[in-house]
Image (tube, grey):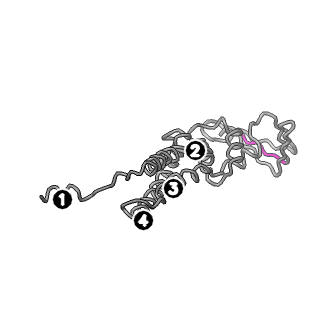
């Protein structure tokens, strides 16, 4: 920190982008942090600050609590922040755009599992549905965490679970439309072969 401004009141004029500070104490520091000079002004106008009230207010904002317009506004006004600080906001923007499509993905999964002409019975369809929805929820949160940590791109973090489970749902729908069974998971098949 090089200069510190302490004011009793501050006004921002958005049309001119000027800050007006009243009863201001300006403190200048050297690189070691020692006070070089203190000045007191009854009023001070500053026109070279890039900060706006929105930027100051959004400094403590959390991406998961912002709406879609607020996320867009945050990214617009804070575009000069480092990519790692913007990653949670970019990820949640993509996640919010992908979220309505999750309903369609769930329908793609539920429709083939709800068709009841299977030889396995209704219990296997219910178990598969529970497993797939749990897996989708797990992967959604895993990809969100990876995107927020800037490990993967925001687009991949927001859309991959939907695309993956939509493909699974469409595959299951194809199998049901052609009256074929989905390949089963046989945990004990190897044991039966060894027992012979």
Residue at the location (36% across, 62% down)? 120
Q: Quadrant of the C terminus?
A: bottom left
Q: Which residue is under mark 1?
A: 192
Decide: is 34 above or below 63: above
The single residue placed furthest to the left in the displayed view is 196
Q: Which residue is under mark 4?
A: 122
Camera-side mark, 1 or 3 = 3
Decide: is 94 above or below 129: above
Residue count near mark 3 (Cα–Cα under 10 Å), binned few <14, some 14–19, many ≥20: some
Q: Which residue is under mark 2?
A: 91
Could you give the CA–CA distance between mark 4 and mark 3, rounded to whole angstroms?
13 Å
Q: Earlier in the sequence, mark 4 or mark 3?
A: 3
Residue count near mark 2 (Cα–Cα under 10 Å), binned few <14, some 14–19, many ≥20: many
Camera-side mark, 2 or 3 = 3
Could you give the CA–CA distance between mark 2 and mark 4, rounded to whole angstroms?
38 Å
Could you give the CA–CA distance between mark 1 and mark 3, rounded to whole angstroms?
33 Å
Q: Which residue is under mark 3?
A: 111
Q: Earlier in the sequence, mark 2 or mark 4?
A: 2
Residue at the location (86% across, 36% down)? 16
Query: What stretch of residues is rendered in magenta?
Result: 23-27
Q: Earlier in the sequence, mark 2 or mark 3?
A: 2
Camera-side mark, 2 or 4 = 4
Could you give the CA–CA distance between mark 1 and mark 2, rounded to whole angstroms?
47 Å
The chief SS type of the magenta part is strand
* Residue 38 vs residue 93, the one in the foreground: 93
Decide: is 132 above or below 168: below
């Amino acid at each position: 920190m090089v200069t510190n401004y302490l004011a009793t009141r501050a006004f921002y004029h958005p049309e001119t982008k000027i800050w007006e500070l009243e009863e201001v104490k300006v403190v200048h520091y050297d690189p070691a942090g020692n006070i070089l000079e203190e000045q007191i002004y009854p009023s001070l106008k500053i026109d070279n600050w890039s900060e706006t009230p929105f930027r100051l207010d959004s400094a403590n904002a959390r991406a998961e609590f912002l709406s879609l317009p607020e996320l867009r506004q945050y990214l617009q006004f804070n575009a000069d922040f480092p990519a790692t600080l913007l990653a949670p906001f970019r990820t949640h923007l993509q996640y919010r755009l992908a979220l309505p499509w999750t309903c369609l993905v769930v329908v793609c999964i539920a429709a083939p599992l709800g068709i009841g002409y299977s030889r396995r019975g209704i219990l296997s369809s219910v178990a598969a549905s529970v497993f797939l929805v749990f897996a989708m929820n797990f992967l959604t949160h895993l990809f969100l965490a990876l995107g927020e940590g800037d490990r993967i791109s925001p687009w991949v973090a927001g859309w991959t679970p939907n695309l993956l489970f939509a493909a699974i749902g469409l595959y299951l729908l194809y199998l049901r439309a052609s009256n074929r069974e989905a390949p089963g998971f046989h945990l004990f098949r190897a044991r039966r072969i060894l027992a012979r």
